[in-house]
Each structure stands twice: as C-alpha cells, then as structure tokens.
C-alpha cells in the first residue's frame, strides 16, 4: 500500500538527504544549483534584520561540510495501522541546538514521512503522493519539508519561541514556498499551545482562504485557547468568520477530541455549538 511504500522509498541515499538538508538549512550565499520546479531556492533562516522580539532566539548555525555517510541501517517499514507515531519526537523539544544539529546530520527524511503521514490521515492523499513523488523521482527534498521542520521545532519549543515560528512561516512565503495543510496545522497548534489564540485564529482563516479545511485537532486547539484565555467573544467572532468561508465544526469529532470535563470543555461546546 502507498503508506507502507512511502517508508521504504522516502529514504533516498544518505548523500542526497544530507546534501538537501545542507542546502536548505545552511546560510551559504553561493548561487543556487539547478533545481526541479517542485523545489525552490535555498533559504537562510537568518533573522538579524527583523524587529527585535521579546525573547529572540538565534537561528541554527551554518552546517559543517558533511562527511560521506556509510550505509545507514534503514528503519522498519511504516505501518499505517500501527498506533505508534510515524516519527519519534525529540526527548527535549526545548533543546533547539540538538534538534537542528540532527536535522543537518541525519537529514529530513523523518520529517517528510511525518508530513506524508499527516496529510494521508487527513484524506489529502493527492498532496501526500505528490510530496512522495518529488523525493522519489527527483531525488530532492521539497522545500516545504525543510521550512516546516524548522517551523515545527520552534512551535514545539514553547511560548518563548512563537515569534520564531511565525517568522519562519513568513520567510517561507517570502521564498516562494507554498505551505500545505500540515504546515499550517503545525503553526496553528503551536500558537494555540502558547496561548496565542488570536494569532492561531488568523492562520485558521488563512487555511480556509487557501482552500484547506482544518482538521478537528487543529481548530479545537485554537478554540480551546480562546476559552483558556477568556476571550470567548473573540472566539465566537472567529467562528462566524470561518462559517462565512464554508467551515462547519463537527460536534461528534469535537466531543471525541477533547477531555469531556471541566470549564474548557463546557466553554468550547458553548462557543462552537451553543450548548
């Protein structure tokens, strides 16, 4: 099946993986090589010219020249029916230096598999297979994978790094790289977890404007943040705006996707369904 094949075939040679990672995440200023139309120009994650943030964090340092990798041991095939996650999350999501180091030395294949898995589970099979085809047929890692990997690292690192996640997304757009539904879901959930409900709501609307339907875990994270922050009226205004763009919350999915007790659950149900 497609998902099982993805785990085996999304593993390009080590040299391709490390080379792609170095190009996409390093801050080199040399001219970009010839690239497939499915990928975009390399981008430097350097925010030295941005406005000062309350808690600025330095971008990942330039990658050293990688040594030729020996044949790595391949992981077991991806099983879509397994309850285990497709990707092992970092043991310490706040240790960005280690996370970025692993991106450069081990490549981005695991992040591509995680994106493929997320798109597939949301029913976006066409997008998932298109992502897979670029890696398999072109031997290149799509830029959306690299940008989303960096964005997700900042989003998971806690409230101190929410601005870094937003800046990474802005630089992604400025580089001509289009986000997919997985990218925006990562951003919305990261902002919501940092109690940045207004910002999370902004990107929910952007998903709809781009023709994407946020899944229940994505929009539920945002509306729970509105309730936690006692901004229920703003949350209701967001809901009406989203409904005007064709969004309809799924009551059954919301009930199964949140803890059914406490004021947050009651607040969310009242906000979304008037119950």
Image (cartoon, helix red, strand yellow):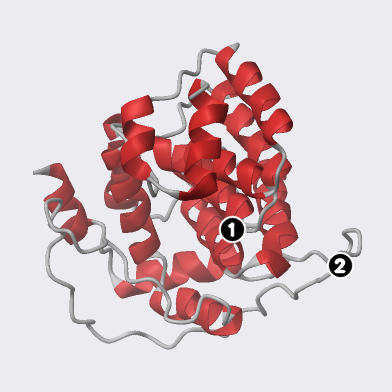
Label 1 or label 2, whichever comes before in sequence order = 2
Q: For this rendering, which residue is in front, 56 or 72? A: 56
Q: Do the residues labelled 1 and 2 touch (CB within 8 Å)?
A: no
Against 76, residue 4 (above or below) is above
Q: In this view, does 238 lie above or below 127?
A: above
Residue located at (27% from left, 50% from top): 136
Indicate left or right for 253 with 171 as reference: left
Rendered view: 32 above or below 258? below
The answer to whether residue 227 is left or right of residue 254 is right
Q: Check the image and report above or below for 4 versus 18.
A: above
Query: Crowding near pointer 2: few (<14 within 10 Å), some, many (20+)?
Result: few
The picture quadrant where one finds residue 230 is: top right
Q: In this view, does 122 lie to the left or right of 44?
A: left
Residue 172, image x and y in percent?
A: 65, 48
Pair 1/2: label in front: 2
Residue name at image x 34 percent, y 46 percent: 118
Residue 67 locus on image (x, y percent): 43, 88
Q: Badge 1 is on which residue?
A: 151
The N terminus lies in quadrant: top left
**Does dot 2 land on a helix, a strand or a loop?**
loop
What label does residue 135 carry, if any? none
Residue of label 2: 54
- Could you tell whether 146 is left or right of 123 in the image? right
For the point 39% across and 61% down, which residue is it?
Answer: 111
| Residue 4 image point, x, y percent | 12, 52
Q: Distance between the residues labelled 1 and 2?
A: 18 Å
Q: Which of 148 and 235 is in front in this view?
A: 235
Which element type, helix, strand or loop, lies under badge 1?
helix
């Amino acid at each position: 099946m497609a998902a099982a094949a993805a785990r085996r075939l999304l593993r390009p040679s080590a040299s391709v993986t490390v080379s792609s990672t170095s190009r996409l995440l390093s801050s080199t200023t040399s001219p970009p090589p010839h690239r497939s139309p499915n990928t975009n120009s390399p981008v430097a994650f350097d925010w030295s010219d941005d406005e000062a943030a309350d808690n600025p964090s330095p971008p990942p340092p330039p990658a050293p020249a990688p040594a030729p990798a020996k044949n790595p041991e391949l992981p077991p095939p991806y099983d879509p029916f397994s309850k285990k996650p497709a990707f092992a999350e970092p043991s310490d999501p706040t240790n960005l230096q280690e996370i970025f180091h692993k991106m450069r030395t081990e490549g981005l294949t695991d992040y591509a598999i995680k994106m493929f898995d997320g798109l597939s589970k949301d029913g976006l099979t066409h997008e998932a297979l298109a992502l897979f085809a670029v890696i398999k047929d072109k031997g290149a890692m799509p830029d959306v994978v690299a940008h989303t990997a960096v964005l997700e690292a900042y989003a998971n690192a806690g409230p101190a790094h929410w601005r870094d996640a937003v800046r990474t997304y802005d630089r992604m757009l400025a580089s001509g790289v289009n986000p997919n539904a997985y990218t925006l879901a990562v951003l919305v959930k990261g902002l919501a977890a940092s109690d940045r409900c207004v910002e999370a709501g902004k990107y929910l609307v952007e998903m709809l404007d781009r023709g994407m339907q946020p899944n229940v875990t994505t929009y539920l994270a945002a509306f729970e943040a509105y309730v936690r922050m006692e901004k229920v009226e703003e949350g209701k205004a967001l809901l009406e705006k989203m409904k005007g763009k064709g969004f309809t919350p799924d009551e059954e999915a919301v009930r199964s996707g949140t803890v059914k007790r406490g004021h947050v659950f009651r607040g969310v149900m009242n906000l979304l369904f008037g119950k």
